[in-house]
Amino acid sequence: MNIDYNERIPNNVDLASDRRLLRALERWQPAYLKWWDDMGPVESQDMEVYLRTAISVEKDGWANFGHVRMPDYRWGIFLTPPEPDRKINFGAHKGEAAWQSVPGEYRSELRRLIVTQGDTEPASVEQQRTLGRSCPSLYDLRNLFQVNVEEGRHLWAMVYLLQAYFGRDGREEADEMLVRHAGDPDRPRILQAFNEKTDDWLSFFMFTFFQDRDGKYQLASLAESGFDPLSRTCRFMLTEEAHHMFVGESGIMRIVQRSAELMREHDTEDIRAFGGIDLDTIQKFMNFHYSVCLDLFGQERSTNAANYYSMGLKGRYQETRIDDDHVLETSVYQTPELVDGKVIMSETSALTAINERLRREYTVDSQRGVNRFNKVLQHFGIERELTLPHEAFNRAIGAFRGVEATPDGDIISSPRFHYHEPSGENGREAGTG
Ligand SMILES: [Fe+2]
Ligand SMILES: [Fe+2]
């Protein structure tokens, strides 16, 4: 199923046959381009960038590389091909045919899921907009722009769903996507991790390592959705997410490697004077990005998450590979709680623990990356390791909300905590739970 680039809006959803939708998207397109101009990468409008552009959604034919002026990038709408006779694989509707239109009784929940996901896409472009000025190399600049144009396309993907399936409120939501801005005090982005600053390259690599990985887990859960157009959109978005995480991991890896070299060469941890980033600083950035990302998964126990699951709207990571009944009415799961200053695990319904389960899978995946960084340190004979901070550290959502804990998970007294707290840190709003 190839994509027609002669269309004003490249697509593989036969947009030409739906005049109403085509008109709505053509009305949104100039607003999007204006947003890109105002809020996208600074000073990049005249640059020719070597970018990959999706040309086909088939497994081995989807990318084309070439020089593009970024505002001329062909943002469009691409869904993976439909799976014949696809079924809803979990929840109360398990076994029924997947929905090709919005199930009326779940309309507002579905819209909320799509809006929350969609809002993160332009947010990250805004957060990263000044990074080009300080790029370490042309290679890094190209990677940054590649990530940016693809996040722009992810916004198109969500806006397509809103405009195609949610009528007038969908069109309004699509407009709102370009009105909220990362860090705007009056019209902020929905999730707090997407209002934080990403204005240096260590932050950018941490962002693409941690935040884009959150994206992977959220998209994978939405790819299980019984609402087939959402599932097909997310499946295609996931193919691009892998590259974003690669940018993050390889970026951190290069920094860790350089730090290790300098530590060996000068026999000291204090390598700033030699142009390196010391491990304390890398660890602090890791503590920050990982902890704000944990909040993105929402409450450990969440009736919203249970409802989304039972309704068949958002599944678990790799739902169909899990060996259970996929209804979860009688299953249990362990979630953490803070009792008398101690973290204890207690049993709860697996349905309400959907967020916690996804978060734990995310943690395992993040830890795998951190292990690879530690291998580099080991290789240089450095005994110190980088670690993910304890889940109680710096949290604004869930069981550890507002708890004053060290990165090691010690719950400490308020004056001691605030003594260590960097200034200007603000709270975060509720996420998906
Ligand atoms: Fe994205
Ligand atoms: Fe991404």
Image (cartoon, rainbow, N blue to C red):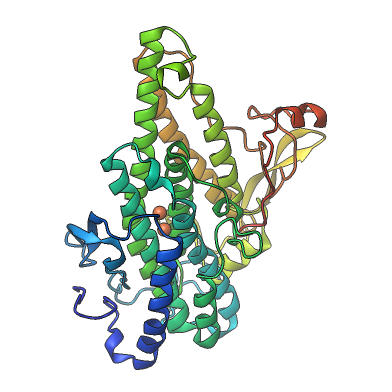
Q: Is residue 139 left or right of residue 408?
A: left
In the image, what residue occupies the spot 33% across and 43% down? 246
**Residue 377 placement (x, y as % from top left):** 40, 19
Ligand 1's quadrant is bottom left
In percent of width and height, residue 115 lies at 53, 69
Quadrant hosting residue 139: top left
Q: Nearer the viewer, residue 134 or 145?
A: 134
Q: Is residue 323 above or below residue 76?
A: above
Between 36 and 418, the residue placed more toward the observer is: 36
Please indicate whether residue 307 sits to the left or right of residue 95 in the image.
right
Image coordinates of residue 395 in percent, x first then y, are 67, 43
Q: Name the residue nearer the viewer: 134 or 98.
A: 134
- For the point 59% across and 82% down, which residue is it? 105
Identity of the residue drawn at 31% across and 65% down: 71
Quadrant assignment for the N terminus: bottom left
Q: Is residue 263 above or below residue 221?
A: above
